[in-house]
Image (spheres, rainbow, N blue to C red):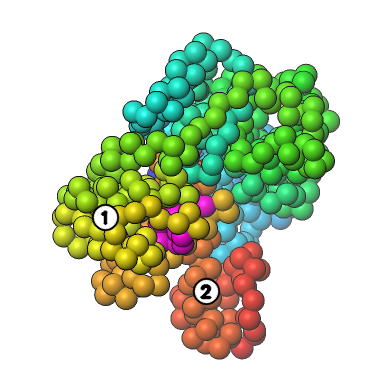
Amino acid sequence: MKPIWIVDDDESIRWVLEKALARENLATKSFANARDAIAALEFETPQVLVSDIRMPGDSGLDLLQLVKSRHPGLPVIIITAFSDLDSAVAAFQGGAFEYLAKPFDIDKAVELIRRALDESLRETSVESGPSETPEILGQAPAMQEVFRAIGRLSQSNVTVLITGESGSGKELVARALHKHSPRAAQPFIALNTAAIPKDLLESELFGHERGAFTGAQTTRRGRFEQAENGTLFLDEIGDMPFDLQTRLLRVLSDGHFYRVGGHQPLKANVRVITATHQNLEQRVREGLFREDLYHRLNVIRLRLPSLRERREDIPILVRHFLVQSAKQLGVEAKRMSDATVQFLSGLDLPGNVRQLENLCNWITVMAPGQTVEVKDLPLELTQEQGGGGGAAPSAMSTSATEGFGAPQHHGTVTAVPVADAAGVAGSPDAWLSLLEMQAASMLSGGQQEVMAVLGRQFESALIKTALKHTHGRKNDAAVRLGIGRNTITRKIAELGIDGAKDD
């Protein structure tokens, strides 16, 4: 991550912001005037720029204008005195992310910079996209049919509906369709419509104007704008709220949409690929999915087989995932005995490829020795087998495998199985390995805003634990955690934490 630039002729303000951001483990670079910052922009760019509005020589507004002309996606925060509020309005008109009025509360300043940082990182990840498309592995006849379909569609812009069970690899197929299409050099944007709350999904898809609703402090591009000239993949389309289906149909019909709170139509040049594990025809009959949208999406249908239909692929998938997990953790790859591979090939694995990948992640962290035997697998997979290698019941528990190390629909990180908690706790650094594994799995799966998802869960866990130790006294908890009273109050509200009380 690039540093945060602070441009201010007041040395004390530069010092205060540098120290506050250093406590947050954020790198900074400071300039005493806009001229030096403009010169530095010839060779490098910051992640966020914080600038005073009034300085000798070039003003903060001059700097803002130059930055926005060269780097329109770079968030700029303007520092202004209360007497300069007219200038603050000019700053917003010039594209500033937000302004800080002197004298400012340092906690609020850091919070604002954090928000700008999140926006900057989100924009960077969207524009750069994943550098490589994850492999789709498979030698089974059912997968060869999928590969042939991808080849036939390689030069087409037609809308594709991908169906298949959860965890079967629908997003990988969507990425492959994009990679081999004429739009390959343009963005691929993925959105799981089931993972976004209904009241936020419209803004997520179409963007919003500044002031469109409470909390909309800046104009934000939606996924359609981010995917311009590229591909937009909408996963779990069957869960899309009915009223938003109407808006999506309108975009697919005439290629235009409006941001939330906006009045100017925007044109979308985007290829839309959708996926679902649900029976859309049944949802249409039940009145839960628009029939006209269904026909608009169901131009070409591509069905992905479940792992039960391609058991011969399990050995090569296991080898691939074990090597992948070992690389992520920087350890030697483990191998499975022939008996273990045979045992896994007989399981139903209702979580499909995702479940198998998560099992390999679990094995890399938890299994003893380099050669994995059947007895080393999670108890949930073996306890009903009586030590044999027959097919497992399809209703078996998958908590040890499908939950670990995967980006879930709602961005949650599930824990290691209770049976193995003691083993993890035995190593003081084990939680870091699990966190790295989780982050790597989410990133390789193409999930967006990984830092935000994991960061919220990390903060929530720390604050809840501190509140338990202080019997709900939030000020005492803030002292224990080493954060400000205002900060913990704000975090408790943002994260929806219950049980806190004033000391």
Q: Which residue is mark 1?
A: 364
Q: Amino acid at mark 1?
A: Thr
Q: Is residue 244 above or below residue 392?
A: above
Between 198 and 293, the one lying in front of the other is 293
Q: CA distance from mark 1 to mark 2?
A: 30 Å
Q: In front: mark 1 or mark 2?
A: 1
As drawn, the label of residue 334 is: none
Between 42 and 280, the one lying in front of the other is 280
Residue 456 shown left or right of residue 158 in the figure: left
The residue that appears at 45% across and 56% down in the rendered structure is 393
Within 10 Å of disc 1 (Cα), the crowding (few <14, some 14-19, many 20+) is many
Between 445 and 38, the one lying in front of the other is 445
Q: Is residue 495 above or below residue 258?
A: below
Tally of numbered discs: 2
Q: Dividing the picture into quarters, in which one does residue 277 lie?
A: top right
Residue 198 shown left or right of residue 33 in the figure: right
User: Element at badge 2?
Assistant: helix
Q: Which residue is mark 2?
A: 463
Q: Is residue 399 visible?
A: yes
Instruction: Tell me where the magenta segment starts and ends, as one range.
Output: 396-408
- Horizontal and vertical percent for residue 298? 67, 25
Residue 364 shown left or right of residue 186 in the figure: left
* Residue 401 painted magenta: yes
